[in-house]
Image (cartoon, rainbow, N blue to C red):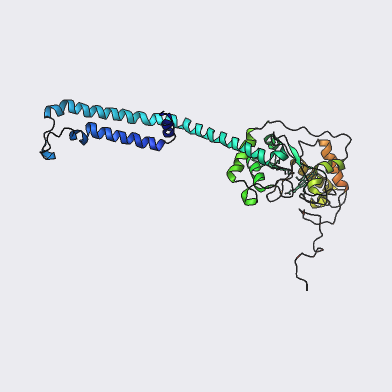
Amino acid sequence: MIQPYVAALAGNVPLVILIVALVGFAVAYFVVGPGKRKGPKRHADIPLAMRPYHSDEELETTGMERAMSWGVALAVFASLFLPIYWLIEPTRINNAVDEFYEQDVQAGREEYQNACATCHGANLEGGSAAHPDPDVDAAWPAPALDNIVARYQDSEVVEDVEAFIYNTLFYGRPGTPMEAFSVGQGGSYSDNQLEQITAYILSVQTGELPEAQEFVGQSGEDVFDDNCARCHGVDAEGGVGPQLINVYERYGWSGEDDGSLEEARAAVREAIVNGRNLTGNAPMPDFDQTLTDDAIDAVVNHLEDIQETGGPSSAQIGGPPTVEGADGDEGEDEG
Ligand code: HEC
Ligand code: HEC
């Protein structure tokens, strides 16, 4: 019967301290303090200051002993209370933190099932989404999320996976089916909810890496179509990722078969192996775990075959290449 009250009090430490202090003051007041003398109205007619009190003898023996015992008792209490509190408090704080964490994970699991499972799978095993361009049949793979920590563990472009997941949820990936979920970016999830989803994802990591795709009977162009075209365009003309038609030239290729070709080739291969994660752009995934070395060589060869020179010097993200100055700026006044 009293349990609910005890439980309610246990959760409210300041209130407990207040009650204990008040009781303590009351005891002190009535047992040893001025309240004690209020008892029998023996001397009601004598002014307070002139009432008889304990005899000298009494004051020097029992009275003094009583006062000193109280002093000792309070000193013992004070010297025990702080160390005990100091011992118990960290455990209490840790338990509270664990409890909050479990609540977050639980809430995150529900939010995940509502908002993410259709594309990334009910068990975070990965899935796919329709391509944002209705003319393209091929689905856009939605990566498995139960291994995201392992996948980015050795990444050169992602340092903090937790922040990476959170930011992906916050901003989405413009141009891909992965939309932004934060309120500020047009979604409907608060920062706290995004943290909960992130906590949930991190709590169910398998640590297993995906195996690199078999590379048998495929051409470099096949590899490109399967893995790159959705971002760089079927003809490498650009989309979410920059056009790659003169990417060698952008990396310093002179157009001749000389040292500059080797350097450009190495730079392009490096981009494919490590991926890219420059702020403000959609990240390019790394392919060192999903494509075998042979497949990466084949796709680099394919890119090399289609290289042209004389293109724009900057990697234009978001559309087919345009030659600088040749396109009339939209909205420009005529005449
Ligand atoms: C409409 C389908 C769709 C929905 C819904 C969706 N995603 Fe995604 N998500 C994708 C796709 C597709 C990608 C890959 C984008 C790319 O190619 O860069 C992606 C990428 C991601 C990534 C980055 C993975 C990586 O390996 O880099 C994370 C993390 C992620 N999504 C989490 C979520 C979470 C959490 C939710 C729910 C709040 C969610 N997504 C909802 C389709 C979706
Ligand atoms: C999810 C979209 C996406 C996919 C899939 C993708 N890329 Fe990229 N790629 C990008 C983006 C975005 C950039 C630009 C990144 C930056 O610089 O911020 C980029 C950059 C590059 C670059 C460097 C270009 C430059 O000008 O520096 C190369 C080379 C490249 N990608 C090749 C590939 C190849 C080959 C594949 C397939 C094996 C591929 N990419 C798959 C999005 C993608």
Residue 170 screen position, x and y as percent: 64, 46
Identity of the residue furthest to the bottom in this view: 335
Q: For residue 158, which quarter of the picture?
A: top right
Q: Quadrant of the C terminus?
A: bottom right
Q: Report the label total.
A: 0
Along the line of sight, the residue nearer the viewer: 189 or 248:
189
Q: For residue 156, which quarter of the picture?
A: top right
Name the residue: 36% across, 28% down.
80
Name the residue: 65% across, 39% down.
112
Name the residue: 86% across, 48% down.
258
Residue 98 screen position, x and y as percent: 54, 33
Q: Is residue 39 left or right of residue 326?
A: left
Q: Quadrant of the N terminus?
A: top left
Along the line of sight, the residue nearer the viewer: 265 or 26:
26
Q: Is residue 6 left or right of residue 333?
A: left
Name the residue: 18% across, 33% down.
39
Along the line of sight, the residue nearer the viewer: 197 or 280:
197
